[in-house]
Image (cartoon, rainbow, N blue to C red):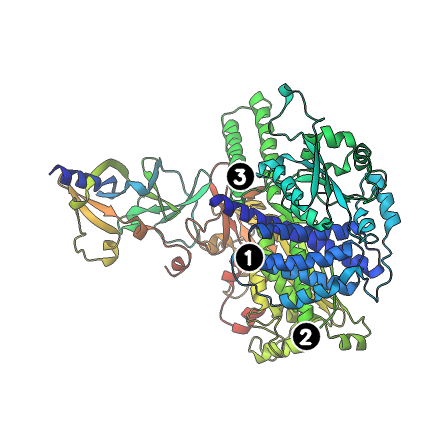
Amino acid sequence: MSSSIDIRQTFFQECEELLEALDDGLNALAAASEDGSVDSETVNAVFRAVHSIKGGAAAFGLESLVRFAHQFETALDAMRSGKLVATPDIVRVFLRSADYLADLIASARDEVPPTSSAGPDLMERLAQLVPSNGARMPAQPAPATPAPTTVSDADDLGFQPLALAFDFAPEPASPAGFTIRFAATKQLYGNGNDPVHMFRALAELGALESLADSSALPPLDQMDWATPYLTWELVLQTSESQHSVHEIFEFVDGLCSLEIRELQADAEPDRDQMIAEAADFSTPTPTVTDRPPAEPAASGPARAASGKSAAQSAGQKGSVRVDLELVDRLINIVGELVINQAVLAQCVQDAGIGAQSDVGAGLDEFRNLARELQENVMAIRAQSVKPLFQRMARIVREASDIAGKTVDFVTEGDAVEVDKTVIERLVDPLTHIIRNAVDHGLESAAARQTAGKPAAGRICLSAAHRSGRVLIEVSDDGAGINRPKVRQIAIDKGLIAADAVLTDSEIDKLLFLPGFSTAPKVTDLSGRGVGMDVVRSAIQSLGGRVNISSTPGKGTTMSISLPLTLAVLDGMVVDVAGQTMVVPITAIIETLRPAASDIHPVAGAGKVVAVREKFVPIIDLAETFGHRPTSPDYSNMVLLLVESGQNERWALAVDRIHDQRQVVIKGLESNYGHVPGVAAATILGDGKIALIIDPDETAQRKRPQAAFAPALMTEEV
Amino acid sequence: MSAAAELSKADDRELVSFRVGGQDFCVDIMSVREIRGWTPATVLPHAPSYILGVINLRGAVVPIVDLAARMGLEPIRPDARHVIVICVVDNQTVGFLVDAVSDILSVKRSLIQPTPAVSSDVTRAFFEGVIAIDQRMLRLIDIEAVLPPIAARQERA
């Protein structure tokens, strides 16, 4: 029983990949449909994705999914065969169908009813797309299939992806039969399929002749029992359609190499001749090569026959599915290894063995290997942001539909890789930001035209690496933040004093205050009681920062800066009253050793240090963490100048800087709980634990809580 | 007779006993993970006084509770002779600093008496009961009650 659950799970995992491929394909199609350069391979890819989902869904009896996927597939098939031309409108229906398909899959997986009710409407629209009896859509131009270009492509690849279009469109008459070339892969037998059942099913369609090709059989002593060596040539005399023949092989789709060719009623070609033709792909014979793309169909005749296993291994996708927990455990162990190496190095050094000795050299090598291992293990967790961006594309589609705005959504830096956890936890805040951009950021089409902008708004989502962090930006070309309005709302809600003097960026940051919403009415999109403050705290919990900048009339940009991984950070190791602590380097702008004359007391409320004419409050870490009372003299201490996302600065006073190094982050929460001002712990080279300081939180705690409005004002992000 | 004996045998509890501040305590052996010597702990800011800090237990960050201070006794001044009893309860790993581990014993459940009424209810809540052995009194600790309160509760403390 559990294995069927496993398979089910695998199916849904595959669905995710297929949906991604589907989205990719449809986006390419959308772009191509604009200028009419639709490439048949794209259509095929989209069709294959839907088809595979349907096939899997059928195996699990997911009826509504199958029904919808079938309708979708039928429409795509029409396009594949050239009966339907991809126009932007049609592609839009496809995109929505893909969204709905994703909904259906999610609902099947979680065993809940689908959330969207778009199904019947989409079914209808898809059905309308399919021309009946091969009649072309009247408004469409003749399907000028880009045959010439594709043929030359195909020649390069020795592969004929367009064949179906030739085959289907001009020859709708029912054929007299088919010749089928069938070669199973190892996996086909591995899954418990047996060709004989399929052949029997074929035989039910009409008279079947079969011929097994055993030429690839090696001598008995060299035979691998698990490798299939036989291929079959089948000749089926039938009046059934090609579709029904395909259906028989539906369950082994992707597990075999399958060629189905129509048999001409009058002239049945010589069988040997036919085999040669089937194998020789450089001549544009009208073959139907369904899937899979990596099957030997692409290779020469000799390989197809004898190099079965080689072709098969080439066809395997170069990835494995691994339990995330297993990866995390691996990362933990590697972290231990790195620490252990440091401890060992320390011991060797303490024992007075020089670095030049064999032991020292060996340890160096060990360190390099451990580091390399760590980096590679970390890379396992890294994932491209592409699926996240695709998901956001969908949010834009939905949001713009509801808001009645046309939106051009552009993404950049899809390939940027970030830790999987970061990506997962970015979904909600990013969704919110994108919805906000569509709902509040972009003006209505009329307002845009008045302002001399194109009617369609533009939202750009980009990702890029910036000095060891990942920068994700959402920018729109809308009206920008309406600062007088934001200010007025903040005053009305009692968030700031009526006479407060605020800079533009301070006003922008008011959006992050809890309970702030500029929408005059609660819309379907944003304003669900979740404010930007939630977005901010979600990003903060990832060790990230969010910033907002806006130019009136030009648009708004939200930038999120995130750490690459949640497992390690670069830290400055410092001494605080005899305790070793770590300050994240990303927070530190500069370190300074102040002159006594630069330090000024502010009444009895603390001290500030003058840094290039600016006064920065000093936070004595030893005092903050209760290690000792306030130091009377900061001039013999080191100050670390830190900056929050809000451009606020503090100087953290520490006794000494030890070192700067990469540390493995260890949570305190599981065994103890949150310690105010402390982000996490780490283990140093001597095996001791050092606490990692959270500079923002430390500063927060130091801030006087008295004045309500100012306290909120200066709250940093 | 023999059946009853067998039943009571299955009803035995294995306990680890140790001394803290001149008194005998014990915990259920099932919650004890290991016993190790004292290593200096990293001080945790804003922690209750009975939390000595955290130590590195093969890569895990484990808080150390001074059991004497937790029980309202004179805090231990830890040195190399002191012992840390590492316990796991509900996936939370905690080390208890004690003076010395004495014994592992098997005690019939029926011999565990309810904790006598002492003045402090708080202290009483720390114990499951007491056991009389060789004219000594073993105080059976309810580890969950002694654990440092996690996160939110700790803020108030």
Residue A646 in view: no
Q: In this view, does A107 lie to the left or right of A668?
A: right
Question: Residue A108 — which label?
Answer: 1
The chain that hosts pointer 3 is A
Q: How far apart are marks 1 and 3 (CA)?
A: 32 Å
Compare marks 2 and 3 and give the one earlier in the sequence.
3
Which amino acid, by three-letter code, is at mark 1? Ala
Q: Is residue A312 above or below residue A483?
A: above
* Residue A578 x, y percent position in the rendering: 47, 44
- Could you tell me if residue B84 is visible in this image? yes
> Looking at the image, which residue is at 76% across and 53% down?
A43
The crowd level at tag 1 (other Cα within 10 Å; few <14, some 14-19, many 20+) is some
Most foreground residue, A566 or A714: A566
Looking at the rendering, which quadrant does residue B36 occupy?
A: top left
Q: Which mark is residue A330?
A: 3
The type of residue carrying mark 2 is: Arg
| Three-letter amino acid code of the residue under disc 3 | Leu
Residue denoted by label 2:
A483
Of the two numbered discs 1 and 2 on the same chain, state the one appearing first in sequence: 1
